[in-house]
């Protein structure tokens, strides 16, 4: 059974993260790269936002007994296979997971240009996933 409170709490956090990311998104590249608070915040809040969507997706899969999640990439694959997310959104979500993995595991060599591009181009994907998950409330 889907627990609405589990989804609601994570959607609320996702909203918080997206709000912060939107405020950072306004910076031009030069402003962004010159201030560690800008790029550090972007890195962390992008990671947290991706974690939130992964958590929600995982909860839905477990609650509806849709399959087994062994890897983060299984989450969008299963939800895509079951028709909850479009193939295009599924692919973008898988790329987000790869980006999240780079933020977490390759933190010594983070390419800030990629972070900036994710900030400028991925918030809509996170918002699209938010809409998908809000339907479960």
Image (tube, rainbow, N blue to C red):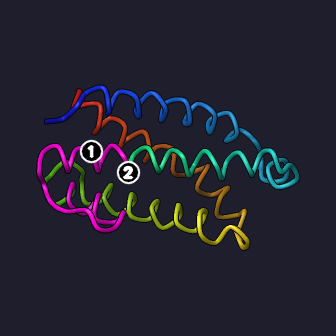
- Which residue does the numbered mark 2 point to in the structure image? 54
In the picture shown, does residue 132 fall above or below 75?
Answer: above
Residue shown at 33%/43% (left/top)?
Answer: 56
In this view, the mark in front (2 or 1): 1
Residue shown at 58%/68% (left/top)?
Answer: 102
Q: Is residue 82 left or right of residue 86?
A: left
Residue shown at 46%/59% (left/top)?
Answer: 96
Residue 124: % across, % down = 46, 43
Q: Is residue 47 left or right of residue 87?
A: right
Residue 41: % across, % down = 71, 45
In the picture shown, does residue 17 fall above or below 102?
Answer: above
Which is more toward the observer, 11 or 127?
A: 11
For marks 2 and 1, give the CA distance: 9 Å
Residue shown at 19%/49% (left/top)?
Answer: 62
Which of the numbered marks, if any, corresponds to residue 102? none
Q: Is residue 7 left or right of residue 50?
A: left
Q: Which structural element holds mark 2?
A: helix
- Which residue does the numbered mark 1 point to in the structure image? 59
Q: Which structural element holds mark 1?
A: helix
- Highlighted magenta segment, given as a residue range: 55-79
Secondary structure mainly formed by the magenta segment? helix
Local packing at callout 1 (Cα closer than 10 Å; few below 14, some 14-19, many 20+) is some
């Amino acid at each position: 059974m889907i627990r609405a409170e589990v989804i609601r709490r994570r959607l609320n956090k996702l909203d918080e993260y997206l709000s912060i990311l939107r405020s950072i998104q306004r910076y031009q590249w030069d402003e962004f790269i010159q201030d560690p608070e800008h790029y550090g915040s972007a890195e962390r809040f992008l990671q947290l936002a991706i974690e939130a969507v992964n958590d929600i997706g995982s909860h839905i899969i477990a609650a509806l007994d849709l399959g087994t999640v062994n890897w983060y990439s299984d989450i969008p694959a299963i939800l895509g296979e079951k028709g909850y997310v479009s193939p295009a959104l599924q692919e973008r979500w898988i790329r987000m997971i790869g980006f999240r993995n780079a933020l977490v595991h390759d933190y010594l060599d983070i390419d800030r240009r990629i972070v900036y591009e994710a900030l400028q181009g991925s918030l809509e994907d996170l918002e699209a996933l938010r809409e998908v998950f809000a339907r479960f409330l």
